[in-house]
Amino acid sequence: MTTVVRPKNLTRLIVLFLAIAYTSAFCSKSRIYGNCRRECSLQSTPEEKAEALRQQAQKLKEEVRAFDEAKQEVIEEEKRKREKVVAEKSERRLRYSAEVPILKGNGVEEVERVDFPPMVGGERKSFIFSVEADLPLGLILGEDEGGLPALRVDELVETGNAANSGIQVGDILRACTATQTTMETPTWQLLAGGIGQPKTKRFMYSTDGRPFEEVMDAIGSNRMDPDERPAVLVFERVEKN
């Protein structure tokens, strides 16, 4: 069976073909025109290029400045932390130390700051202090009821030397001056067969963990000081809330 194309249908086909062709040509032309516009926009003047470079340089400069500021802030923060640690150590050193006379090897006595690690623990805070007081002190020492290896002030005479020097009931004795008499012989006497002469020296005596009688003897030995100096005592006191 033979298909016959009618003129009317042929005309329609021709019109449809022309419409498709025109639309395709228009789209291609639009794409070309758009690409041309983009290419034209990329073609900047020297002034515009210089301005773009200036803006990039300014942006880079701001980024570098922000980085330097951040780095400086980190350095300052580390400095503040170090200063805080040093301040805390210094404060702790002052809290748990006292200036006391120290007998040197050459026989000369020098005042130095000596550390006394805190004996009181837990949440209670304490501090170390030293006093000078003449004998008799006018106080009664007793063993610590809490089990600390030290003697505590149990009683005080109100008008006694200890009370007048600032010692309080409850203070923990940590050290005191004591004297000791030894025989010393100069070298020339040793060569000549001399027996030497007695000499009394004063020194600091740690009372931590020492027997009661030994501590009392050490305190009493200050009466033998040839220079008749007051006794130096070191205490630890618990701060009251």
Image: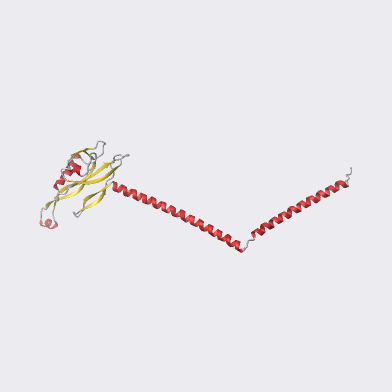
**Residue at 53% across / 58% down in the picture?**
60
Is residue 190 depicted above or below 117 in this figure?
Answer: below
Is residue 60 depicted above or below 231 in this figure?
Answer: below
Asked whether 99 or 165 is in front, the reply is 165
**Residue at 88% across / 47% down in the picture?**
7
Number of numbered tags placed on the structure image: 0
* Residue 183 position in % (x across, y down): 13, 51
Q: Residue furthest top?
A: 145
Q: Residue furthest bottom?
A: 46
* Residue 20 position in % (x across, y down): 78, 50
Asked whether 87 or 209 is in front, the reply is 87
* Residue 161 position in % (x across, y down): 17, 43
**Residue at 86% across / 46% down in the picture?**
9
Quarter of the C terminus within the rendering: top left
**Residue at 69% across / 56% down in the picture?**
35
Quarter of the N terminus within the rendering: top right
* Residue 57 position in % (x across, y down): 54, 60
Task: Identify the image's colour scheme: rainbow, by chain, secondary structure or one colour.
Answer: secondary structure
Tell whether 200 sits left or right of 2.
Answer: left
